Structure formats: C-alpha cells, structure tokens
Image (spheres, rainbow, N blue to C red):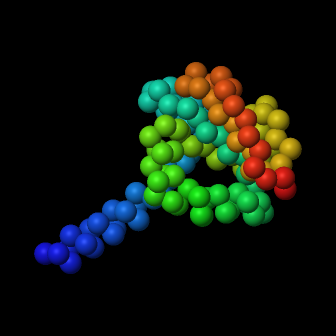
Amino acid sequence: MKKILLTLLLISSSLFAELDWAPSYEFGLAQAKKEHKIVMLMFSKKTCKMCNVMKKSVYENDDVAEYVKNFFVPVEIDIEVYPDKYGYQVFGTPTYYFLDSNGKQIGRMMVGGA
C-alpha cells in the first residue's frame, strides 16, 4: 500500500510541475478574462537558449509552476512563426508582456537579448 501511495505521489508531482501554455494568443486572452487572471506573454524562438532554460528549468520547478498556474495564463509566441508579434515591441528573446484580463498591458520585461 505504501508503495502504491508513493508511486501515485511521484506521478502526480511530476504532472503538477508541467505548465499548461495556452494554445494561442486569442485563447489565452479569453481564458484570462474568464478566470480573472493576468496573461503572461512569452515571446520566444526555437534557437533562443534562455527561452529553453526558462521552459526547462524555471517553469518545471513545482513552486514556480504552481504560482504561475494560480495567477497567470501563460502564452508562448514564437516570433519566427508570428513575425508581427501581435503589435508588441520585441527586440530580443525571451521578452515578456503582462496583460490584465481585459488585454491591457500592465508590464513588460526582457530577460534575454538574442
């Protein structure tokens, strides 16, 4: 019985650490409005080393993932797929924008510079 409980605990904690990124910009905005959360836009590209560090190291941390899930709707936008960047100024990756549940910008942060 103890082995089963331990196994279930390990499985649930590994699943918990995963962040559910919104499948699109529009979906993220709609979800944030519905859940009264802040949109966290992460502008990235596949070759961005810091973007991959953030996704694989930072966002897989249980405490970080839980915090993001509770307060934000995370949306990743690949600037090579969406070069217009939805009108946001992005000069390097990763760049973050934070929007209220109505889509109004409330913050911006650039982490990398690639």
Query: Percent position (x, y) of residue 15?
Result: 40, 61
Residue 86 visible here: yes
Residue at (82, 35) in percent of width and height: 89
Q: How many marks?
A: 0
Residue 39: image quadrant is: top right
**12 over 2 or under it: above or below:** above
- Left or right, 35 with respect to 97, comes to left
Q: Let me know if residue 22 appears in the view.
A: no
Residue 110: x and y in percent read: 77, 44
The quarter of the picture where residue 35 lies is: top left
Left or right position of 72 against 9:
right
Left or right of residue 101, residue 5 in this image: left
Q: Nearer the viewer, residue 1 or 43?
A: 1
| Residue extending furthest toward the left | 1
Q: Position of residue 44 (x, y in %)?
A: 73, 51
Q: Quadrant of the N terminus?
A: bottom left
Quadrant the C terminus occupies: bottom right
Residue drawn at (65%, 22%), measured in percent from left and top?
A: 104
Q: Give the camera-side residue of 107 and 101.
A: 107
Please tell me in which quadrant of the rendered image residue 95 appears.
Answer: top right
Residue that extends furthest to the front in the rendered view of this protein: 63
Q: Does 29 sit above or below residue 56? A: above
Q: Residue furthest bottom?
A: 3
Q: Residue at x 75, y 49 (%)?
A: 111
**Residue shown at 68%/62% (left/top)?**
52
